[in-house]
Amino acid sequence: QVQLVESGGGLVQAGGSLRLACAASGEFFGILDMGWYRQAPGKQRELVATINIGGNTDYADSMKGRFTISRDNARKVVSLQMGSLKPEDTAVYYCNARGTGPLNRREWWGQGTQVTVSS
């Protein structure tokens, strides 16, 4: 029912910026809580930021003030603007969708996009 496709990853120098985008298929974007997670080599997947259907956002402490999550319901896209990047931000970034209402308890993941921050 929902497919998520991330884009925008790449190689950037420390201190630089990068913008990730996640495009969702289907007709249910308006009832999906969206989020970004990341997984670095040898580490568990961790929360980066979330934005719910009401536009309320939440960030992991280490991302506050550097990253901004937003959503465009008309285009069915959730974006992550990343700034002041650090080498420790290097990871595969995954888009996540969690259903609400009739899609409650359903969850989908994108395939991930690599972000590499060089020092």
Image (cartoon, helix red, strand yellow):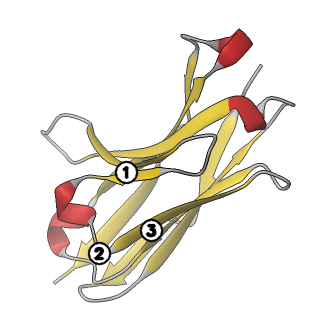
Tell me the quarter of the picture where residue 79 sits: bottom right
2 or 1: tag closer to the N-terminus: 1
- What is the quadrant of the C terminus in the image? bottom left
On the image, the x and y values in percent for residue 2 come to 73, 26
On the image, the x and y values in percent for residue 85 come to 27, 78
Which secondary structure, mark 1?
A: strand
Residue 12 in the figure: left or right of residue 69: left
Whole-angstrom CA distance, mark 1 to mark 3, is: 10 Å
Residue 93 in the figure: left or right of residue 86: right
Seen in the picture, residue 105 relative to 46 is either above or below; the reply is: above
On the image, the x and y values in percent for residue 97 come to 57, 32
Which secondary structure, mark 2?
A: loop
Q: Which mark is residue 37?
A: none
Residue 113 in the figure: left or right of residue 104: left
1 or 3: tag closer to the N-terminus: 1
Q: Find disc 1 in the rendering and name its residue.
A: 58
Seen in the picture, residue 103 relative to 4 is either above or below; the reply is: above
Q: Residues within 10 Å of mark 2 (few under 14, many from 20)?
A: few
Tell me the quarter of the picture where residue 72 sits: bottom right
Whole-angstrom CA distance, mark 2 to mark 3, is: 8 Å
Q: Find disc 3 in the rendering and name its residue.
A: 68
From the viewer's side, name the closer residue of 59 and 109: 59
Under mark 1, the amino acid is: Asp
Under mark 2, the amino acid is: Gly
Which secondary structure, mark 3?
A: strand
Under mark 3, the amino acid is: Thr
Q: Residues within 10 Å of mark 3 (few under 14, many from 20)?
A: many
Tell me the quarter of the picture where residue 118 sits: bottom left
Q: Which mark is residue 65?
A: 2
